[in-house]
Amino acid sequence: MKARIFAAAILAAGSLAVHTAQAQQPAGIKRTDAIKADLGIQGREVVQVRVDFAPGASFPRHAHPGEEVAYVLEGVVEYTIDGKPPVTLKAGDALLIPAGAVHTARNPGSVHAAELATYIIEKGKPALTLAK
């Protein structure tokens, strides 16, 4: 009986974590996890995520504890790294965002946009931290 209660508690906590993560998504943004795996480099892991942007949607200022390679799959995405002018990429273009760089991404267009974001980050740290 205790095992069933414990299992139910774990499932409920997992469901809450997923619900909380989805609730924190900015409007018009959908993040879909592709892979998270250890690398052959001590203390580093790779995280890959597809990010879909509705027309006009933007992701708020944030940073990653490692490098990000942003590859635009569809549409147009504008990236602004603090202290630098915005860079607009179209499908097939890529951008390297340095570790710890605070930046934003937005879809300035009137059609759907998507990127494949690949992070090489410190193991055990959150892949994304919102900036203040």
Image (spheres, helix red, strand yellow):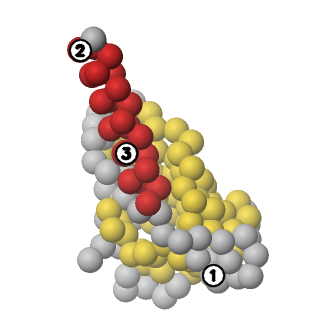
Residue at point 41%, 40% (across, down): 15
Question: Hey, which residue is sitting farthest left in the picture?
Answer: 2
Element type where label 1 sits in the image: loop
Residue tagged by mark 2? Answer: 2
Task: For label 1, count other residues whose C-alpha is less than 10 Å away and answer few (under 14), some (14-19) or many (20+).
Answer: some
Q: Residue at x 28, y 48 (%)?
A: 125
Quote the CA–CA distance across marks 2 and 3.
21 Å
Q: Position of residue 64 (x, y in %)?
A: 36, 59
> Residue 114: image x %, image y %?
66, 63
Disc 3 residue type (three-letter): Leu
Number of disc labels: 3
Does label 1 or label 2 sit earlier along the sequence?
A: 2
Q: Is residue 31 left or right of residue 4?
A: right
**Residue kind at label 1, given as amino acid type:** Gly
For residue 16, the mark is 3
Kindly report the distance in space between the C-alpha atoms of the residues bearing marks 1 and 2: 50 Å
Q: Name the residue that disc number 1 marks.
A: 56
Q: Is residue 127 left or right of residue 43?
A: right
